[in-house]
Image: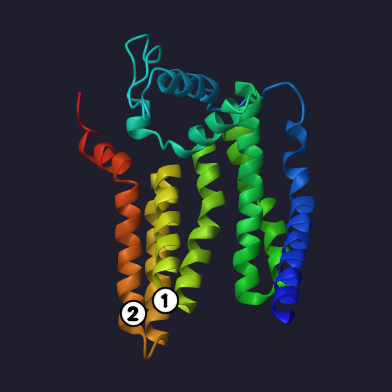
Amino acid sequence: MLRFKKIFDQRKTAYFDFIIVLIITIPAFFSLFNNFYFTMHDDQHLARLFLLDQGLKQGYLYPRWVDILGFNFGYPLLNFYPPIAYYVAEIFHLFGTSFIWSLKLTFILGFLLASWGIFLYAKKLLGRSVGFIAAVFYTYFFYHAVLIYVRGALAEFISLAILPFVFLTFENLKRKKNLKNSLFFGFTIAVLILSHSLIAFPSTIFLFLFFLFYLALQSFERLKLFIYSMFSGFFGLMLSAFYWIPCIFEKNSH
């Protein structure tokens, strides 16, 4: 009975925390609640989402080459542009929302994931109060607003929403070295690569520094941490290999 009460209290606290984080985040995307689109530097997202939708309807699970673009000669869009953001938007579209609202909901989801992810990570390291402070600063960090409302860098924006979960799952693996946490860590690595490879690359440098730091602290379980971490990296690379391998080897093709 005490165990169920503890689980109930933990879930109630988690729901309360999420509501607070939601309240913190709402002002960041409140301006999106209208029926209009907004101007940005990269204004091709609607066209790319439409072409992804057409490719899926034609039976291609991952349409690397799309037509219409490139002056009607076609363009290898998803061979080089990270796909996660558009697939998320496509899921919203499949549930009946318009292309504009599908993209807007993706923006909103990015804000929420970023805020919630950094809250969970900071909470695990330093406590709930610090988690809420981190959520405020990460959400309203000016670069976030520039990414969406000025540059329109959707893929980079989504990658910054995924990044806290990468460090969170690594922290979980450091604390409990098991296959489950290793798989979660590898999965977040794959999602980060598929959201923005140029963000994923420098992030691995910081992850490696964290890894060396934790490895130095693990006096009795260094080998275990090393094995699970290497497995996570390999697992993440293999999950995302369909994207990054052609991206690397076909970048100089004509």
Residue at (45% x, 76% y) in the render: 174
Q: Residues within 10 Å of mark 1 (few under 14, many from 20)?
A: some
| Vertical arrangement, residue 236 with respect to residue 30, above or below | below
Q: Nearer the viewer, residue 174 or 149?
A: 174
User: Is 254 left, or right, of 164 in this rendering?
Assistant: left
Q: Which residue is mark 1?
A: 177
**Element carrying mark 1:** loop
From the image, tell me which residue sits under label 2: 224
Q: Are marks 1 and 2 in contact (CB under 8 Å)?
A: yes
| Figure check: 1 above or below 118 | below
Q: Nearer the viewer, residue 137 or 58?
A: 58
Residue 164 falls in which quadrant of the image? bottom right
- Where, by quadrant of the figure, is residue 9 drawn? bottom right
Cα gap from disc 1 to disc 2, whole angstroms: 7 Å
**What amino acid type should be assigned to the residue bearing mark 1?**
Lys
Query: Left or right: where does residue 222 sit relative to residue 145?
Result: left
Name the residue: 54% across, 44% down.
158
Q: Is residue 35 above or below residue 205?
A: above
Q: Nearer the viewer, residue 152 or 72?
A: 72
Q: Position of residue 207 (x, y in %)?
A: 41, 65
